Amino acid sequence: MRKKLIPYLLVSPYIIYFLVFVAFPVGFSVYLTFNNWNIISPMEFAGLSNYKRLFNDALFRKAVVNTLIFLVIHIPFQIVIALFLAELLNQKIKFRGFFRAAFFLPVIVSGVVVTILWQQLYGFDTGLLNRVLVKIGFAKIGWLTDPNWAMPSIAVMATWKNVGLYVILFLVGLQTVPPQYYEAAELEGATHLQKFFRITLPIINPTIFMVIVLSTIGGFSLFIEPYVMTGGGPLNSTVSAVLYIYKQGFFYHHMGYAATLGFFFALLILSVVMIQKKFVEKDK
Amino acid sequence: MKSIKKILPLFVFALVVSCSSDSQTRDAKIIYWSSNNTEEIEFARYIVEKWNQKNPEEKIMFQPVPEGQSSEEVILAAVVGKTTPDIYSNMWEGDVESYARAGVLVALDTLDGFMDFLHERCDSAVIADVTSPDGHIYQIPWKINPIMLLYNSNAIKEIGFAEPPKTYSDFFNASKKFQRDNDGDGYVDRWFGYAEVLVTWWQRFFDFYPLYLAASNGAPLVKNNKAVFNNEAGVKVFEFLRVMYKRNYFPKERLSARQDVFLDGVIATRFTGPWEISHTEKFKPARFKYDFHPMPVPDNHSGNVYTYGDPKNIVIFKTCLDPPLAWKFLKYALSEENDLKFLEITNQLPHRKNLDTNPKYAGYFAKNSKMKVFAEQAKYVKGTDQSPVLKEVFDLISQEYEACVIYGKKTPREALNDAEKAVNLLFLK
Amino acid sequence: MKKIILYSVLLIGSITFLYPFVWMLGASFAPENEISNLVFLPSSFTFGSYLQMFEKIPIGKAFINSMIVASTITFGVLVFGSMVGYALSRLEFKGRSLIFYIIIFTMTLPFQITLIPQYILIVKFGWIDSYTGLILPYLMNALAIIMFRQYFKTIPQDLIDAARIDGCGELKIIFRILWPNSIPALVTVGIITFMASWNEVLWPLIVIRDENLMTMPQLVTLFAVGGRAESQLGVKLAAAVILALPIVAAYVFFQKYFIQSMASSGMKE
């Protein structure tokens, strides 16, 4: 009897954790979406009004679109750069360890540090980037103050921060390509690019999809960068979905509405990831 | 089982240690939370000690609000957890109404002698300001920090002005003269003033709202669950600021991410409160001179110049077991005598009438001439309207403010129309 | 020729990643009025920004808080993760695959959905402003469980059988037999967990308001966003440097493990 109980005892911490911190919150979240609640007053039943509000909330729509814009810039950019750098590192070179370590450094540093730092680089008047631009005869760019530039700027920064991780992942993938393939291709006189597209790319395809999925999930939780750098401005061009949920919940204490936003947004993420997974499986 | 016995205690210990934070012994009759600003703590300590000496039977216990980022959040958590203090002395006026509606505040007008006290302390406008729409009063006006125009005296002199600009036209003239491109790269790097460009709702306390109060002689933003800010004054303020940004008299960049631009001479003015005095004194370069002046007004403005007073008030929570005693203590703490002490220790203004003419305070203002300017302004300050959705109102105005004033995407009329519509929707719910 | 291009591209690449940090370090030691023109290193070094920062925010305390929180979480994740991972990989019981699928499912569940209710839970339990509120929701980690499950599968059954014959209980098997043979898994899970909790900002922002309990990234975030740096830029940068320092120092020493751990955490997804 005791023997039979042991496995359950071992997994019991997880079961408790799951019930308290996953199952209950998810259930409660669904319940909250049908209520209005500012935490201090009693809950009020709201029917479907939170959902109605969500579908009429232009700012939330904008926040979701902003997040998607971020992803659309961030992901391709990240994959191309990461692949490029990984390809370079995969050559016969000295100091590979150093280069790899350098590329990886921003990955381990807190996002807060990165945002404080880049806020300085992106400054309009005294920022390093604009000083360089003016020196070489270009016009200054409102990296964080121009509504058209702000989100791309944040996406570039995020790429800078995360790309090192994906370089490593690709490097692992590249090393699984059998060298004979390249040798054979060289005998047939294939160029570098041909080798890359014909041999490398098909083999590391799974890695690419994994990177897409990983950075999609990461990108959907975009929060600290706009929170520190722009506060969501200019003209709400950098309000991310999570920032908006945070604002509704913890600024205005619209707990019911914030839960509705969170719930809806989570479904959105799940479906995007599902679609991506479908693609991966098809490809296999 | 042995090995886990070795590991778990450590772990449990860490948890237990971490949990034992909220174990205050309640030997005092009343618990009082002050703000956690150093000077205010000093004052609270002083006043509580004095009271406890005089009233050993009715001891007050004081602690600064356990605050990190925002005291509002702490109070909210305390309300939810039913761990509110008896007295809290740093309540933003705009928050009171929602707490009052949640039924966690004591209606002070039901306490003995409260109305007499209030009439003696404040004039009728202030009393009207703090009266809830339900007719009760849940807060005692305590202190104010009026928003005024801070200016660099040397810079004003340098551009040939004898005194700081008073009207919007003056402002444009001065701005034009002060604006400069230092390094010849075709970009302005010296602006006449600066206002924070973030849309965060409370940023408008330091630009739009005081300017609006000045232009409208202290008109409300919302009244009887309706937006009332879409008027001439509102349009003029939006137009004024819009021009300031359009002509690059104000920078669109967030200078707050840079070093102190006012002390650096990069800007010559800003809208701010008396707290700037101690900061400026601490960091100012040699020969730096500065002063304060009321907010700028439209050219044809007549009457006194109002501004936002950033009032912080005192409330008694319903968790208090002995509200009359709490009230007795507060009456004592807010006496004329102790208000002087408050002024001396904190350099913030007690929210009471005739501050600048009351002989009791004359000595202090003679010594602190910059504070005297604020005391004179104190006659013409407004708080915020009593509405449970005030933050959202400011947020909606701020959204339109950004679109119109900073980015010029809308005319002032359009922006205010849109803001009015959105705010009225808020009340419909 | 080709080599030269290759190396210069790599060099430019590494400068892109390293230079901002060098600039930040230099700026944090520069006199306040030099920062806006700084390109590389300041003309004179000063500790002024650091001294001011230490005066303004309890960064030392925040360091200790972060340390306590991150270590406790890491420790908990290692202990609980290996317990559950062991049960799932080496023991037979009813519902095993159900639990496994639940774990996989929670991995795909975005945190946005549980954020608000978890906050309310913490409020109702009275864990606002306590280490408990920071730690408890993170003690369990699906990824860690999966990684332990995978790794424990590779350990020979003989080892476990031998221990059973010696009369070891299941816990003893996990911590005495499996742990010493699973160092790579422990290191990987440990580093990932520690780094993630060390760098976490959103949850502390929500749960902690008492400055004395704030974690380092939270304190520095609020310092950078709020007005308390009194517009002194150097002070903000100094705070950022101090925040980056512990992890970077660990990284310099254990670089290989960091990179391997992060890479394998990505692979498992």
Image (cartoon, coloured by chain):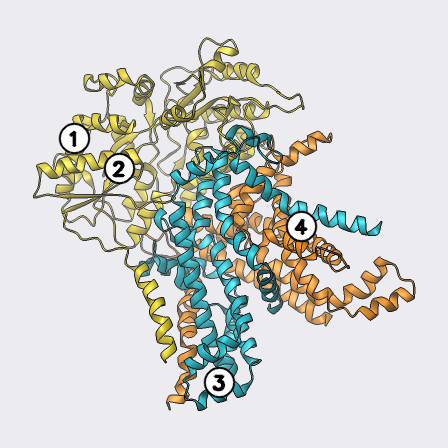
| Element at label 2 | helix
Q: Which residue is mark 3?
A: C91
The N terminus of chain A, quarter of image: bottom left
| Element at label 3 | loop
Disc 3 or disc 1, which is closer to the eye?
Answer: 3
Can residue B429 be spotted in the picture? no
Of all chains in the rendering, the one displayed in yellow is: B
Can residue B27 be spotted in the picture? yes
| Element at label 1 | helix
Residue A87 in the image, given as x and y percentages of width and height = 75, 58
Chain ID for label 1?
A: B
User: What kind of residue is marked 1?
Assistant: Phe
Q: Is residue A151 left or right of residue A48?
A: right
Mark identifier at residue B117: 1
Identify which residue, A214 or A183, lies in the foreground: A183
Circles 3 and 1 in contact, beta carbons < 8 Å: no
Q: Tell me the distance, in whole angstroms, between the alpha carbons under discs 3 and 1.
A: 75 Å
Q: Name the residue rendered at 14%, 39% in the picture.
A: B111
User: What kind of residue is marked 3?
Assistant: Leu
Mark identifier at residue B405: none
Colour chain A appears in: orange
Question: To which quarter of the image does residue A270 belong?
Answer: bottom right
| Element at label 4 | helix
Of all chains in the rendering, the one displayed in cyan is: C
Mark identifier at residue B41: 2
Q: Tell me the distance, in whole angstroms, between the alpha carbons under discs 2 and 3.
A: 60 Å
Answer few, some or many: residues within 10 Å of disc 3's Cα (few below 14, many 20 plus, some between 14 and 19): some
Q: Which residue is mark 4?
A: A73
Identify which residue, B305 or A55, lies in the foreground: B305
Asked if residue B417 is positioned above or below residue C76 in the image, the reply reads above
